[in-house]
Image (cartoon, helix red, strand yellow):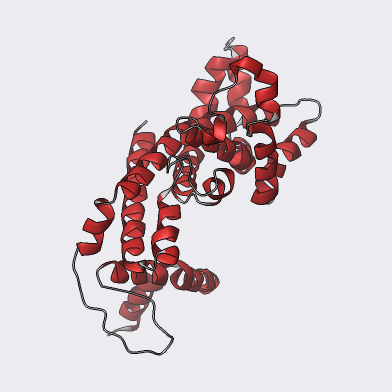
Amino acid sequence: MTKATRRGVLTTLLGRQPLGIVFAAPYAVFLAVVFAYPLGLAAWISFHDYFFAAPGAAVDRPFVGFDNYVTALSDPGVRRSFLNVLVFLVINVPLTLVLSLLLATALNAAIRGRTFLRVSYFIPYISASVAVVAVWLFLFSNNGMVNQLLGPLAPDPSWLVNSKLAMPLIALFVTWKQLGFFILLYLAALQGVPKELYEAAAVDGAGKFRTLTNITIPGVRTVTTLVVILSTIIGANLFTEPYLLTNGGGPNGASTSPVFVMYQRGIEQGNPDVAAAIGVLLVIGVLVISLINKRLLERG
């Protein structure tokens, strides 16, 4: 093999800038250890009769095929949890997308108190979930401030114990809490939209709505795809909010999520194989939804 050939092979394997691999290697190892290995182990567990045993104990865990998946999908609680998270995503993802884009556009303009408003929207995102949940419990409990303001118009049963309102309220809570992060993404993207385009639109007499639809939205399309995918992944991993707001997915499972059901089946009931099957199904569902959204957004 000639020197030129060896150089070509190395360039193909390592790229034109091999130093980049050196810098990326620690994060690649992190991804492999923290994400890839647990996902592979979960997939393996889902196809075996797996149970917890003492460390170092040699136990037989036979291959059972798709039995764990059949058990998971035949459970009404599991099916309802996937339906609940679908309702959550239908509310949360579009609301997050629209509000974060509109607020980022407004905060990117030269308005008074812009820095204060930016910080105000970001504070809920960095605040501890337990502390923020306490505020929402104060607002939306049976005798909370919202019901007192609504008076006879307050829902009965109340918000968090109402099977039709519990999950939509959780979706609103998560939207509000995560909004600052997505506003930050859009603010960064808006810095890359050429100001000359806005100046030309103003000269042509374009209004705010036309400027938004013809310049701002196309200019941040890549970030829009990222926001949709990230909000979908975050919503699919819903656990803390229903656990704290509705005392573990109440009323009667109306606000349970697949991750919460995984916790119940795997930790509380000692069936990690069924829990792993639920997790694999959730990963597949998130991948399918994310790919569909990516294709639809990029096609536009």
Q: Residue at x 61, y 26 (%)?
A: 196
Foreground pick, 216 / 57: 57
**196 on left or right of 263:** right
In the image, residue 245 sits, relative to residue 11, either above or below, namely above
Q: Position of residue 124 (x, y in %)?
A: 68, 43
- Residue 110 in view of the camera: yes
Q: Residue at x 30, y 84 (%)?
A: 2
Q: Which residue, as the protein is rendered here, is positioned at the far left?
A: 65
Number of dots carrying numbers? 0
Q: Position of residue 72 (x, y in %)?
A: 28, 56
In the image, residue 205 sits, relative to residue 82, either above or below, namely above
**47 on left or right of 22:** left
Quadrant that contains the N terminus? bottom left
Q: Position of residue 270 (x, y in %)?
A: 39, 68
- Residue 189 in view of the camera: no
| Picture quadrant where residue 38 is located | bottom left
| Picture quadrant where residue 4 is located | bottom left
Foreground pick, 118 / 165: 165
Q: Residue at x 46, y 32 (%)?
A: 91
Q: Position of residue 249 (x, y in %)?
A: 48, 46
Foreground pick, 2 / 264: 264
